[in-house]
Image (cartoon, rainbow, N blue to C red):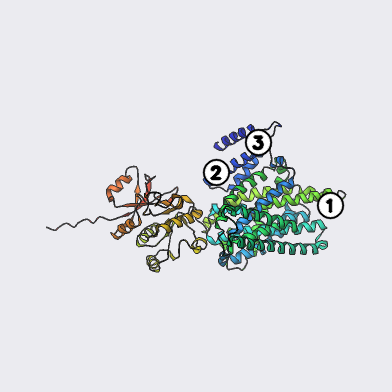
Amino acid sequence: MEILGFMDSLYFFAASGVSEEGRMSMLAYLGCLLVLGVVAQWTAWRLRLPSILLLLLFGFGLSYFTEVRIDDYLANESALLGVVGFFVAIILFEGGLTLKFSELKEAGTPVLRLCTWTVVIAFILTSLAAKLALGYHWQICGLLGAILVVTGPTVVAPLLRLIKPRRKMASIVKWEGIVVDPIGAVLAVLVFITIKEGGLGRSWDDVVLALLKTGLIGMGCGLVLAKLAEYLMSEHLIPDFLESLFFLALVGVGFAGSNALQHESGLLTVTVLGVALANQKKVSVKHILEFKEHLRVLIISLLFLMLSGRIGLDELGAVWGRGLFFLALLILVVRPASVFLANRGSDKVTVKEQLFLALLAPRGIVAAAVTSVFALEIVHAAEVFPESGFYAELALQAKELVPLVFIVILGTVTFYGLLAAPLARRLGLSDANPTGVLFAGADPWIVTVAKGLVAEGHHCLLLDTRFEKVSAARLEGLRALRANILSEYAEEELDFAGLGHLIAATPNDEVNSLAAKEFAHRFGKANVWQITPEDAGEHHSKAVASHMRGRFCFYGGPKFKAMEDIVARGAVMKKTQLTEVFTVDDFRATHGDDAVILFREDAEKGLRPVTVNGEGIHGPTTIHSLVVEQKVPKRKEG
């Protein structure tokens, strides 16, 4: 009901922006897109749903209730496809920036198979499924088969954020989603060439030439632009305030320039550009990645809202029955067969991992954009050669491709989005709500705290650079690694499965502040904590700026030395159930003011550190505390 009320309010807002011609103004339409994008993303976050699903539904609803589409504000469909293409290029570039070759140590073989054999098998099986379910010409079936081998970061990234799989599976899915996108686009180009030339026999030379040109231009331009950017950044020839804009322009030049030289090679160029920059060692591009990630959320919201709004009920109704049959074949037959056949005999992925991959292949914007491009090309060919009955028949079928692919996108996002997270948890490949703790530091008081948490079934990982501290923690049965919390290893190679919080608790307050700032991107600002520093409460000219720190943890704000002292006096971890009868005041009266309340736990949000002011500590809840056990004196006999 709240959503319906919001839609009514949005409708009145849109109506207030109607121009004299009776059509919503461009400004009002863009305002609706932005508001709907934020509401869809926020609602998905709150309800733990795939954001893409809500974006598709909201976009369709906006078009249905206002009868307005993005096409109403653009000169022609080519303009829209150009904008969509550039947006997709930005997303693929950002995705490439996240691909580290170090991830391929354990995921390399599965990624290679998914991007080669799986693509080939999926292409063949999808083409056969299209022929069976849709009855199209083999040329159109082949084109559809090529387009639908892609998954893509526009849908995979939000799902991974929802699923939170273990590091190996996240790497495999991420690499496949980003690398297969340009492969699918190139494959679609090759199929289109055979359609245009009238058959594979006549176009074999053109196909080979196009493949070579696409590979050389895409790889070459991507590497050259990466080297250029690396040189300019290392020589500090780009001022800081222009860096984000510079990379945005670089993506635009690479994408448009490559496409001008060879059709659809631009996606390969920007992907190679991102991967090359991510794996060079001269300059840091992390700040660029963070900017692009924020831009990606905006772009994904706009793209799905705009493109879903272009589909009408009449267009969907024309292909609805056949589309659902085709969708069922893709989900239940094509993807599982492709994954299991491609990984047959491999010892690099378990059966459970293959099952997870077999049930995760959502289609996204690249499929929609490429479909629109080639459908338009086929219709244009029919107009150029009106005497050709062959092209005329292909054009009729090509016009159904866009709503058909929309059904595939909506269906796969819904099915995989709702199934993947519980499936991953059932297979032991992810945690539903990771609330374990990553401790920066392994001092004795941290070991005591971590032991208490582990004894209650919580995940803990300790990082420290001091060998003796790590060894002592391991002797206590804890997971501890000798590593710097600020190292590239800690950020890129650690498996964070089961961990939902960082507590920076080294003896160095500046290191703690830096760690909190660095890991806010991974865990979220709400879940990044540090032990209260010595300069807390000092004048702002002496204390570290608040935005450079994490949240201060533990009730009362004990500092590092205080935590050392209470453990040295024999404090132990104690779990206590607070109720409306036994309150936190009763707890303190029982155990004294020395007791330090560290964590609270409940069924809804799990384990989380307590804030300095003790916000929210009231029953019913469970608290974990450091308590100095009071020794009862022995009674004298007699």
The kind of secondary structure element at disc 3 is: helix
Residue ID at (59%, 60%): 233
Q: Position of residue 352 (x, y in %)?
A: 56, 61
Viewer-side label of 3, 1: 3
The kind of secondary structure element at disc 1 is: helix
Residue ID at (59%, 34%): 8
Viewer-side label of 1, 2: 2
In the rendered structure, which amino acid carries the disc numbered 2?
Thr
- Left or right: residue 586 compared with residue 29: left
N-term-proximal mark, 1 vs 2: 2
Q: Name the residue under label 1.
A: 390
Give the alpha-carbon distance from disc 3 to disc 2, as whole Å: 20 Å
Q: Residues within 10 Å of mark 2 (few under 14, many from 20)?
A: some
Residue ID at (40%, 61%): 441
| Quadrant, the C terminus | bottom left
Label 3 close to label 1 by CB (< 8 Å): no
Residue 336 visible in the current orientation: no
The kind of secondary structure element at disc 2 is: helix
Give the alpha-carbon distance from disc 1 to disc 2, as whole Å: 48 Å
Tell which of 82 and 230 is nearer to you: 230
Q: Position of residue 374 (x, y in %)?
A: 75, 52
Residue ID at (55%, 62%): 168
In the rendered structure, which amino acid carries the disc numbered 1?
Phe
Q: Say which mark, if any, is on residue 65.
A: 3
Q: Which residue lies furthest to the left in this view?
A: 638
Displayed quadrant of residue 30: top right
- Left or right: residue 269 compared with residue 500: right
Q: Name the residue under label 2.
A: 43
Displayed quadrant of residue 530: bottom left
Q: How crowded is mark 1: few (under 14 residues within 10 Å), some or many (20 or more)?
A: few
Q: Position of residue 413 (x, y in %)?
A: 62, 50
Q: Say which mark, if any, is on residue 423.
A: none
